[in-house]
Image (cartoon, rainbow, N blue to C red):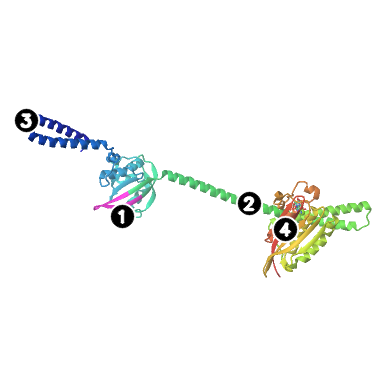
Amino acid sequence: MSNHYILWISIIICIFISLLILVGGGDNYSNGSLGAYSLLSLGFLLLLYSNCKTANPPNKHKKKTKNIISMDSKGGLQIILDNVIDGIIHIDHKGSIKLFNKAAELMFGYKESEVLGKNINIFIPKKYKDKHKKYLKNFNNGGHSAIIGVNREIEAKAKDGSIFPIEIGINEVYVGDEQIFVGVVRDITERKKSEERIHKYTDRLEWAHFEMQQARREAERANKAKSMFLANMSHEIRTPLNGVMGMTELLMNTDLKDKQSKYAERIYGSGSLLLTIINDILDFSKIEAGEMKLDPQPGEIKVIVKEIKEMLFAKYNEKGLKFTVSFGKDTPVKLAFDQTRVSQILINLIGNAIKFTENGSIKLVIKNKKSNNKKASILFEVTDTGIGIDPSKIEKIFDKFAQADASTTRKFGGTGLGLAICKQLVSLMGGTIGARSELGKGSTFWFEVTMPIV
Ligand SMILES: Nc1ncnc2c1ncn2[C@@H]1O[C@H](COP(=O)(O)OP(=O)(O)OP(=O)(O)O)[C@@H](O)[C@H]1O
Ligand SMILES: [Mg+2]
């Protein structure tokens, strides 16, 4: 009962008691006063109760009871259905629409009243109608349906005739004896657009990747062709140059006047320099074109080092440099290696050491870094006390035609191919090459290769 009613009842009781007192008076007073007092107390009790109720703070939850849905009620279920973001459609076994929630209304553009009782066909685009009929027929004949219990992506038709993609999950339920199908429908237009965009980007990326690979293959082919051309050209130039050198040598052995002899020596000197450059270009081009093949043969490092020392004697001796060679104790004596190419690397490194050192010494150290009874990893180190290299330039000097600074060629000669060839050869041997240096103090160039012990 509301507070309002209790108040009014209390007032009425009070008025009634007052009247009793007035009417009761004299003799009747004692009888009347008993009933009157009882009612008076009841009136006050009610007043008190009513005050208590008003004194209590209003119960917030109670106020909301109007909105609480009873799950059992049909209205409650409707509220839930209307607030679901997915479209929910019920159809019976003939395909006749029994329920169409608010989200479905928004999606298809129909009001529920327009579609109730109509066939689900109205949402199916023409091209899917036959398929739909087949599914329904098959299902009604007790066959297995491929659409029950699985989520599918299909197209649907809206009231305005527009076709849009949906994701639909259909389940079969029984309400009493009645068989119904519950379809949960989601508009996936945006998702499809995003997927399409992603596909487009993926296609473009794949195409770009394909083009890049094509371009790389093209560049590699072109580079190989260029290297082959260089290798052939160098070879072609070397043949007549050898002729010029041979003839000059013969000329120098004839009776020449002093001036003629000097000219002949100049021709020979320049010819040798040209031959070195051509040989370097030939080697480098051959390696780049993949034409350089190693020829490992059993041999002794000591032997080739002795030959190199003799070969370079004039050069380091002329500059007053000391050249020492030392071998680690456990360096295997006989190893299989391409002696020409290992010599070539050592001549390049020691040649550089001599070229870039004015005073002091050059040291060649050969160590066995790691070995078992089959193979040994041999480290060759060439240390000089020369001009040194700025450490920031060390990586660059192993590139072709790269020199530590622009004045090197002018001051010391050379084309900057020596180290590039060394790097390529070491890499062909499956080894590593590097350098450490301090400007003005000297450098150490090293390479390490694994060689079979024989
Ligand atoms: N021992 C060294 N001391 C100082 N600088 C060096 C030393 N060895 C190489 N360099 C630097 O590295 C550069 C590249 O060396 P690299 O042997 O490739 O070419 P190059 O000697 O100049 O010419 P090339 O060897 O073709 O005749 C040199 O120009 C030089 O600047
Ligand atoms: Mg060099």
User: Which mark sits nearer the N-terminus, 3 or 1?
Assistant: 3
- Of circles 2 and 4, the one toward us is 4
Q: Are marks 1 and 4 in contact (CB under 8 Å)?
A: no
Q: Are marks 4 and 3 in contact (CB under 8 Å)?
A: no
In percent of width and height, residue 235 lies at 76, 56
- Of circles 3 and 1, the one toward us is 3
Residue in the picture at 32% in, 52% down: 171
Q: Which residue is mark 4?
A: 446
**Left or right position of 121 against 388:** left
Task: For marks 2 and 3, give the CA distance.
Answer: 132 Å
Q: Which residue is mark 2?
A: 218
Which secondary structure lies at badge 2?
A: helix
Task: For marks 1 and 2, give the CA distance.
Answer: 60 Å
Task: For marks 4 and 3, give the CA distance.
Answer: 138 Å
Q: Which residue is mark 1?
A: 139
User: Which mark sits nearer the N-terminus, 1 or 2?
Assistant: 1
